[in-house]
Amino acid sequence: MKLKVFIKKDIGMILCIVFFSIFMVISNILKPYFDGAYWYVVSSVQRILFGIIELYIFVKIYKKEKWTDVIHFKNFKYGFLASIGMLLYLPFEVVTYYIIGAKEWLNTTIPIVVSCLLFQQIATGFWEELTFRAFVCEGYYQRNTATAKNRFVYAFISLMLFGIAHVIECDTLAVAVYRFITTGIWGFAFASLYLYTHNILVSMLMHFITDIFLNVPIFVAEWNDSIALTILDNYMQFVFLGIIFIAAVYFLQKEPKNSVSRSKF
């Protein structure tokens, strides 16, 4: 009986794994044939197409009347309030890696920069939030026991799935652990946004904004060898990630702004 209830209420978690697995297979097939800006554009298109298909499936599974019942502006302002931890991280990122850290930038092209930092990050925010937040966490809204404990469970599952998804291509255990912790915390924070507001759009927007800042350092050609960078990168980074995590915990235990009615199977 419990298994039937899980499948009915939390089938989104299974679909998250299925969607991501299919996405990675197709991505690995396409990648050898493209490079530079072409690859970023192709990758962006793939994310958008997957997002559109997943949005359609989400509407059908959770019996929404239309896609605007999923992507909307209700409770949007509360999402910015709940994003305080992420917003505080951005100045740290700029100071640490752009100002103090970057010694020399890559001599690249505008199409590569735009396709990477704009097109791909918009597409990533759209697709990943539907996959790892909407599908994973929507089960919370299908249950009668809307408790803080349940919100923490769903946010933790999102953390695990999002963290694992970002370590499958890591070369070493140390890199995998680092990636799991950092991306997992971000996933936990985005899940907190969704569970607090039931608004996937604000999670998509914050994902897009933060991804731009977090991906700029890939264009750094050489880093400064300084004590300040070492301290900021090795220690202060985790302080600010801790702030993101604490803020997410705070809003998870608060009563959600559920002006959006629950869908029914």
Image (cartoon, rainbow, N blue to C red):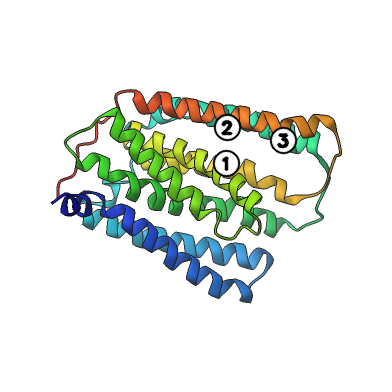
Of the image marks 2 and 1, the number of the one nearer the N terminus: 1
Residue 41: x %, y % from top left: 58, 63
Residue at 52 percent of width and 50 percent of height: 122
**Residue 259 in view:** yes
Residue at 37 percent of width and 42 percent of height: 200
- Asked if 231 appears above or below 23 in the picture, the reply is above
In this image, 238 relative to 5: left or right? right
Alpha carbon distance from label 1 to label 3: 12 Å
Alpha carbon distance from label 2 to label 1: 7 Å
Would you name the residue on which mark 3 appears?
Answer: 233
**Residue 63 in view:** no
Would you name the residue on which mark 1 appears?
Answer: 182
Instruction: Give residue 108's quadrant in the image.
Output: bottom right
Would you name the residue on which mark 2 appears?
Answer: 241
Mark 1 nearby-residue class (10 Å; few <14, some 14–19, many ≥20): some
Mark 3 nearby-residue class (10 Å; few <14, some 14–19, many ≥20): some
Report the amino acid beneath label 1: Thr
In this image, 121 relative to 131: left or right? right
Residue at 47 percent of width and 60 percent of height: 47
Label 1 secondary element: helix
Alpha carbon distance from label 2 to label 3: 11 Å
Of the image marks 2 and 3, the number of the one nearer the N terminus: 3
Label 2 secondary element: helix
In this image, 49 relative to 89: left or right? left
Report the amino acid beneath label 2: Leu
- Furthest residue in direction front, as rendered: 173
Report the amino acid beneath label 3: Asp
Mark 2 nearby-residue class (10 Å; few <14, some 14–19, many ≥20): many
Asked if the residues shown at circle 2 and circle 1 are in contact, with their CB atoms under 8 angstroms apart, the answer is yes
Residue 138: x %, y % from top left: 29, 45
Residue 167 is labelled as none
Residue 66: x %, y % from top left: 24, 51
